[in-house]
Image (cartoon, helix red, strand yellow):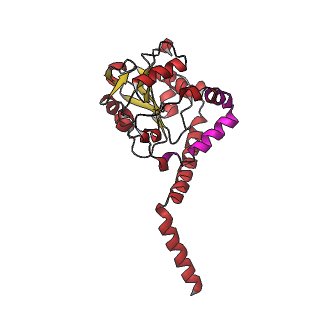
Amino acid sequence: MKLTCNIVMLLAALYNVHDTPVMGFVNNLVQRRGSRERISRRDSISPGSLTATNTKQALSFPIIEGNSGKFRSTDARTALSVPEFCSLQGDRIKMEDILPHGDKDVSIVVLMRSWG
Amino acid sequence: MADYNITLVMVGIGTSLVGKELVKHLELNESENIVFADPENALHDALDLNRGIINTFFNPATAFAMRDRIFGGGMNELNEVLAKWKDAFYIPPKRNQAFNMGATLIFRGNETLFAHLDASPGDHADTQRVIDLAIKAVSI
């Protein structure tokens, strides 16, 4: 009977702490480990060893890292085209004003953290 | 990257004025067509990038990133940055913007080929790897 109670209390405790910051941290840790393993497997394909023709297949584009579940790669470029931001001169611009429009044009977009 | 006709755009959360000071501090010449300012973090919101103190600052990704730098030979670069960081200490327009994480993306036309969403401070995409992937993307 005592053993049963202990098991029930243990299960209840586990259930109750599921959404606490501690379990959130543990979940992050577990997800990170899984993510790192996937990245590690992908990195085992050395980009330097690839030919132009098999690059897309071998690297399995798109490569998405660190997605919390909200990011949708299929419409990322479209989503970025909507908001306005500023040039260093203070002019209001949109991403579509500065990114190339060709189907084969490659661009790198780095969204930095706050400069503060 | 200009040789490969790859466009580079870097957008930071903050005002244009601070952005100007920063590129001057970093001695980034001719960066006006590369570096941009987003005072409202509108681009970060558009992609729903990682944010919030619990999800980011308490995320173990920072510890893993630091470990990778320490054992991967990246400490010299980090020390170089930290040495002159005190002269570039800026306060973001809004306090909670300090918890907005960044991202690195490679596009080919409208297609997303690569996206690294920073999970926590220090968890950035590897710069050389991004450049290599972009160059490869040009030849697809």
In the picture shown, does residue A89 fall above or below B52? above
Q: Quadrant of residue B50?
A: top left
Q: Residue at x 40, y 34 (%)?
A: B93
Location of residue B59 in the rendering, given as x and y in whole percent from the top left corner: 54, 48
- Of residues A43 and B50, the one drawn nearer to the viewer in this rendering: B50
Task: Quadrant for residue B47, please give it.
Answer: top left
Question: Do we see residue B91 in this rendering?
Answer: yes
Main SS of the magenta part reads helix
Q: Position of residue B111 (x, y in %)?
A: 38, 29
Q: Report the number of discs.
A: 0
Q: Position of residue B109 (x, y in %)?
A: 37, 24
Looking at the image, residue B139 sits to the left or right of residue B83; the answer is left
Residue at image coords 45%, 25%: B18
Q: Nearer the viewer, residue B117 or B106?
A: B117
Q: In the displayed structure, would residue A64 be above or below residue A49?
A: below
Q: Quadrant of the N terminus of chain A?
A: bottom right
The magenta region covers B55-81
Using the rendered view, name the quadrant where residue B66 is placed.
Answer: top right
Side (left or right) of A107 relative to A43: left
Q: Residue furthest left?
A: A82
Q: Is residue A61 magenta?
A: no
Q: Residue at x 64, y 27 (%)?
A: B83
Q: In the rendered view, would you say B61 is above or below B11?
A: below
Residue A105 picture location, percent across and down: 40, 19
* Visible residue check, residue B140: no
